[in-house]
Image: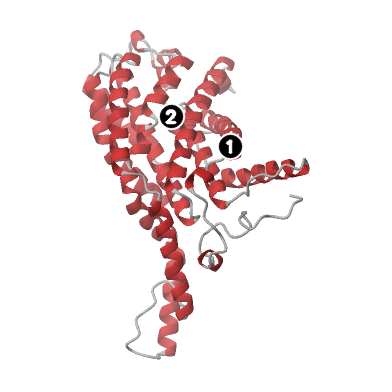
Amino acid sequence: MGSEPDAAELNGPLLARVPAVVAGEEVVPPWREQLTVRGIVVSAILGVLFCLITHRLNLTVGIIPSLNVAAGLLGYFLARTWKAALARFGIVSKPFTRQENTVIQTCVVACYGLAFGGGFGSYMLAMDQKTYELIGADYPGNRAEDVKNPSLSWMMGFMFVVSFLGLFSLVALRKVFIPVSVILGDGIYNIIKIIYATIKEIVNTRSKEGRLPLVWVQDDDGSSKLSSEEKLLNEVFVKDSIPPWLAGSGYVGLAAISTATVPMMFPQLKWYLVLSAYVVAPLLAFCNSYGTGLTDWNLASTYGKIGLFIFASWVGQHGGVIAGLAASGVMMSIVSTAADLMQDFKTGYLTLSSPRSMFVSQLIGTALGCHCSSHLLALLDGLRYWQS
């Protein structure tokens, strides 16, 4: 970018398995320093862009590819461009680290993830007048009073009261998910290493008492380095852990606020139905996060359909359509954001990023997503963009 990179800048591999880290050549910045104004601005720019792309794909193709890698690469490019531009004017800025890049990626993913997980291309459009007319006024259960056209006021309010709960639902289980995600994510590589180690052990037959190396075939120095690197990963990730009481109280408090406000937006969805959704939501979020770690496929829409059928049948013909769709939105938002957060924690674990900085970045990205996704859908609705 025209300037010599600093020692602490992102000039090495993104993963933390580097001997230089163990040797102390790189200092991991505190979690507050990983959150920068530069990173938030870059995240906001990319978040708006990716929300627009997600809306376009959601309303036309219906398939949303994973944009995590693109978010990380573009975040790196814009941040380094920012730093180089300031350097031309003689302004010295903070070094750009891998932790800041991870935080940017986390914020962008949280922002554009709401464009899909928020249901802006599914249940929200299923409530409007056009859908009511396509189904037919004489269809059983399809009532004119259950129509709710997309509006910026209720869409943004609904997103704010339901989208943050998924962030608090599975925070206490992150230590369980990280090892599982890392092991399963590197499964093919580990299998190859196991086969190679087994063949080498049989050919050499040095000692029948030697144990079979499961993942790494290295000398004693390499093994000691590996254990030191893993120890560093664990120490950094656990040091800034999020207290379980904060996650629990946050979930309970937000659930209480949502239980009181959602029935005001959707009178068909009674308060006890919303409360029931929040009781079972952490279980579904666990299942979706586990499945996303296995397959890298977020099935939030599937769990939303489960909530739709259950709550629609619970309410019945008198308001069951809107109640089911609104409950679907509640379930989709929770399970989608929870899965995204667990995947981001895995990335943060490998890049020596603090869980606290990533959690705060996720909160910022979720707030940006509530604004961007709602405004963009309102704009596209006014332009009748989905008819193209």
| 33 shown above or below 20 | above
- In the rendered structure, the answer to whether residue 93 lies left or right of residue 190 reads right
Q: Amino acid at mark 2?
A: Gly
Q: Of all residues shown, which one is farthest toward the bottom?
A: 206
- In the rendered structure, the answer to whether residue 74 lies left or right of residue 249 reads right
Q: Amino acid at mark 1?
A: Val
Q: Residue 146 occupies which quadrant of the picture?
A: top left
Which mark, residue 118?
Answer: 2
Marks 1 and 2: which is nearer the front?
1
Q: Nearer the viewer, residue 320 or 87?
A: 87
Residue 72 point in image, percent of width and height: 57, 46
| Secondary structure of residue under mark 1 | helix
Q: Earlier in the sequence, mark 1 or mark 2?
A: 1
Real-space Cα separation, disc 1 to disc 2, in angstroms: 27 Å
Q: Nearer the viewer, residue 102 or 311?
A: 102
* Mark 2 neighbour class, 10 Å CA radius: few under 14, some 14 to 19, many 20 or more: many
Residue 253 point in image, percent of width and height: 29, 29
Name the residue: 43% across, 29% down.
118
Name the residue: 48% across, 16% down.
152
The residue beneath circle 1 is 37
Residue 187 point in image, percent of width and height: 42, 62
- In the rendered structure, the answer to whether residue 388 lies left or right of residue 254 reads right
In this rendering, does residue 66 appear at all? no
| Secondary structure of residue under mark 2 | loop
